[in-house]
Amino acid sequence: MKIAVIGTGYVGLVSGVCWAELGNDVTCVDKLQSKIDQLNSGKVPIYEPGLEQMMNANRTAGKLRFTTSLAEAVQLADLVVIAVGTPSLPNGEANLSFIQQAAEEIGQVLAGYAIIVTKSTVPVGTNERVAAWVGAHTSQPFDVASVPEFLREGSAVRDTLHPDRIIIGTDSERAAAALESLHRPLTDQIVRTDIRSAEMIKYASNAFLATKISFINEIANLCEKVGANVEEVATGMGLDQRIGGSFLRAGIGYGGSCFPKDTQALIQIAGDVAYDFKLLKSVVEVNQLQRRSVLEKLADSLGHLNGRTIGLWGLAFKPGTDDVRESPAADIMAALIEAGAVLKVYDPIAMVNFKRTYYNAAGSDDNIIWCEEQWEAVLGSDALCLLTEWDAFVQADLQRVESLLRGSVLIDGRNVFRLEQVASTGLRYYSVGRPALKRERSETASL
Ligand SMILES: NC(=O)c1ccc[n+]([C@@H]2O[C@H](COP(=O)([O-])OP(=O)(O)OC[C@H]3O[C@@H](n4cnc5c(N)ncnc54)[C@H](O)[C@@H]3O)[C@@H](O)[C@H]2O)c1
Ligand SMILES: O=c1ccn([C@@H]2O[C@H](COP(=O)(O)OP(=O)(O)O[C@H]3O[C@H](CO)[C@@H](O)[C@H](O)[C@H]3O)[C@@H](O)[C@H]2O)c(=O)[nH]1
């Protein structure tokens, strides 16, 4: 199949590369010249394990190209895939301006029948608008379909090649048949729906996963008060097949480019039809409060934060990605700085993106020291907070943490250390929903 993919972000690039890997002829388009130049020089602009190698193998095989010319890509394509961003507007609603622009541009250059697929996450009814935006600029025949994307960052290639299901929402038999044959090599779980249901499946899935996380975080907060251990609780709950064990890891709350944005958008979608989505509003509120639990634990262990030096391990919203959109670390850092703390921060992959997104490229803020390696963030700090569960942090030698800290407090925002492991050190240890090790210890530096 000849495929044009509009937008070379996490979704467009990974989908394009994987479709080429399956033997299709793929042209990826982005309006950012710098991105296309980078891709044409064989470099992937995002951190996504396994992607660069697969991309270059398919470029070399002549199955994958990159261009800024939407016309060049669309005119030859049987299938045109829209994978541009749908970020939040200030009121939480999805911003559809990139979708509209892409749809209108497609309409302007369509040279014959094509199937136009929206992979971006879009509110119910958007694909009907896409059809109108395309149709306003062309007399060529076309069909539209909603094929929402469910990949996770950090495992995007694997998720794309081994999806749990493919949802195809379209009114057109011709489009459905073509899309089924495109996806059949990936899975037998292909579900056909009407367009609006496909659009809703994406939001409902993300909202449900976010609900699971906020639910277990509330159970964790309760566990701390009643002396239970949330890990044991989650294991016990998850063995019930009706509940399932995934997405029950308590922590500092969800972040990323999807859950925060898509939960807000679904609240807004409901509001537009005068439906008050109370449960989802609480999920969002709980998530916001959960980020503050790190500050409460620091205040409990250190007494006050003014003038304290706090080491932070992890800036990405989760391990395996350089994406820092809506990362809990951003809120936690801002609150710590406001409380007068000095921060020593380190992330193995996301430092550059984080500085650029939240502190301008130079990372300028007198209260932040951007560390070159993970141990620098520990050295001389009153406390160390683990915010992202990168392997290098999970495998860290806790005796070394103890010896480099000036204080003795370790806040584990992702429950990565075993309680017995920490018990063999003198660290004062706070995790999420598990018993704290609050023992007294001298705050003398041992550098
Ligand atoms: N990131 C994820 O893990 C993920 C997973 C599933 C679904 N989604 C959804 O997929 C969509 C894309 O997400 P993303 O994270 O890949 O976005 P992104 O911001 O990483 O990338 C979007 C790209 O589209 C390009 N673009 C915008 N308008 C264009 C136009 N008119 N022509 C050509 N290029 C254009 C931008 O320059 C950018 O490179 C969003 O709706 C998102 O909610 C994302
Ligand atoms: O038990 C859990 C699982 C996840 N998280 C957090 O939840 C966030 C999102 O994690 P994850 O879902 O792994 O990452 P994303 O790449 O954002 O993927 C989600 O968002 C994508 C964009 O819509 C969807 O395609 C995916 O199916 C959906 O999992 C991260 O901050 C995680 O730390 C938890 O706190 N506890």
Image (tube, rainbow, N blue to C red):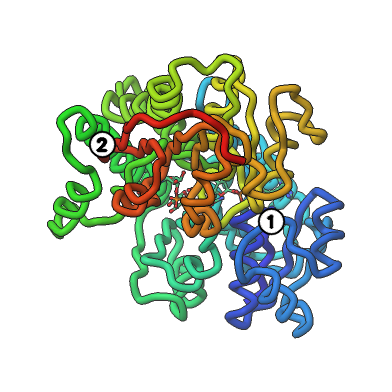
**Residue 387 at x, y = what percent?**
50, 41
Q: Is residue 16 left or right of residue 69?
A: left
Residue 283, compared with residue 340, is above or below; it is: below
Q: Earlier in the sequence, mark 2 or mark 1?
A: 1
Residue 329, compared with residue 334, is above or below; it is: below
Residue 69, compared with residue 101, is above or below; it is: below
Does residue 394 show up?
Answer: yes
Q: Is residue 233 left or right of residue 202?
A: left
Whole-number angstrom distance, CA of label 2 to CA of label 1: 34 Å
Residue at 38 percent across and 29 percent down: it is: 290
| Location of the C terminus (image quadrant) | top right
Q: Amino acid at mark 1?
A: Ile
Residue at 78 percent across and 70 percent down: it is: 65
Does residue 140 show up?
Answer: no
Which of the numbered marks, if any, corresponds to residue 421?
none
Residue at 66 percent across and 47 percent down: it is: 350
The residue carrying mark 1 has its beta carbon less than 8 Å from ligand 1: yes
Label 2: few (<14), some (14–19) or many (≥20) C-alpha neighbours in 10 Å = many
Q: Is residue 438 left or right of residue 292?
A: left
| Location of the N terminus (image quadrant) | bottom right
Q: Is residue 76 left or right of residue 393?
A: right
Q: Amino acid at mark 2?
A: Ala
**Residue 294 at x, y = what percent?**
43, 29
Check disc 1 and report the residue beneath it: 46
Give the SS element for disc 1.
loop
Front residue (pair 308, 277): 308
Check disc 2 and report the residue beneath it: 220
Label 1: few (<14), some (14–19) or many (≥20) C-alpha neighbours in 10 Å = some
Give the SS element for disc 2.
helix
Residue at 50 percent across and 70 percent down: it is: 158
Choose top left, top right, bottom left or bottom right for residue 432.
top left
